[in-house]
Amino acid sequence: MVDLSIQIIKVARPIHWIKNLSLFAALFFTSNLFNPTLFRTVFWAFVAFNLLSSASYVFNDIIDAERDKNHPVKRNRPIASGKLPISIALIEIVALLALTFILSAKLNFLFHLSLIGYLVLQILYSLFLKNILGLDILSIAFGFVIRIYAGAFVINAHLSVWFLLCVISTALFLASGKRRSELNVTNTSGITRKSLSKYSRELLNSYVTMFGNAAWLSWALYSFFESPRASLNVWLFLAEISKTTTIDKMLMATIPITIYGIMRYESIIFEGKSEAPEKILLTDNGLITSVVLWLLVVYWVLYSVAV
């Protein structure tokens, strides 16, 4: 019974919930992180999205059970390994979906549409989109866009088009990196995903490079056009002394950190270690350092410099 409970939790892939933290993006970048009402709203939206994404992972594992048995890592998943019966997995899906919409009942209509849109996307992805060249990567990226907009919908926040471009570029970068790493696995275990048979190493290398460049450039544009004006007395005093010391567009200070983070992740990709981005983000010291430093600088600019 204990082992079955462990498998039920494992198949839900709670480690992947880190991706759903993107729902807090709109709250964070609109300087509303410490608004208790809005934070509470986004928190419950985050919980609902965690349950929904877990339901989609269970569904995907049911669809991929036979194929996963041939994968050196995925064959250890609860359903592929036979440790979790499909009947129990189906019950888990129903329970997760029910809890999702119960928890989100008091949230707004547009958020519910985003939940439904994400669910439909994941079903289509599991059934056939993940096997189509190009569409598999675009589907993963669109999933992140839905997350970001779900977090904005639930608090009725505005999102800059530059920020959206940055989200899309970064999501495409992570997705193409994931495929590039999966291609390394196939060298020793054979093809376990249909779309991989259509990708070449050179094509995925170009995708990673292209989307990596797009990610930091779009963030640079966002930081240039959307950086808040410094308003604390110390910054205003410096501006009065000389135009040379005028402080503005301070969010651009994050650009070098962004570039380093992308460089670090690209090095991981080409080492073939990026098949699970959420695990890399939690275990690689270089990435952890760059992400934490990036968040601290963004927080300092949005919540201290421009108060």
Image (tube, rainbow, N blue to C red):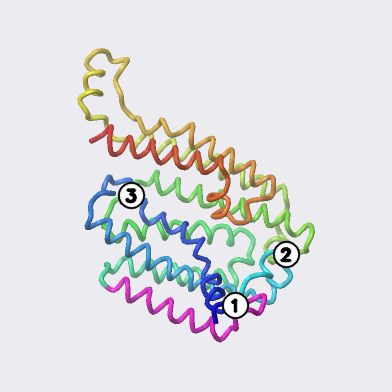
Of marks 2 and 1, the one in the foreground: 2
Give the spatial CA distance, label 3 vs label 1: 36 Å
Indicate the secondary structure of the residue bearing disc 2.
Answer: loop
Pinpoint residue 96: horizontal percent, then vertical percent.
43, 76
Give, as a three-letter code, the residue at label 1: Ile
For disc 3, the marked residue is 159
Q: Is residue 7 magenta?
A: no
Q: Which mark is residue 72?
A: 2
Q: Are marks 3 and 1 in contact (CB under 8 Å)?
A: no
Camera-side residue of 76 and 261: 76
For disc 1, the marked residue is 62
Pinpoint residue 305: horizontal percent, then vertical percent.
28, 32
Outermost residue to the front: 2
Q: Which residues are magenta?
A: 79-105
* Marks 3 and 1, the one that precedes in the sequence: 1
Q: Is residue 101 magenta?
A: yes
Task: Report crowding for label 2: few under 14, some 14 to 19, many 20 or more residues within 10 A (C-alpha).
Answer: some
* Marks 2 and 1, the one that precedes in the sequence: 1
**Residue drawn at the location 67% of the way across and 75% of the way down:** 81
Task: Report crowding for label 3: few under 14, some 14 to 19, many 20 or more residues within 10 A (C-alpha).
Answer: some
Q: How many marks?
A: 3
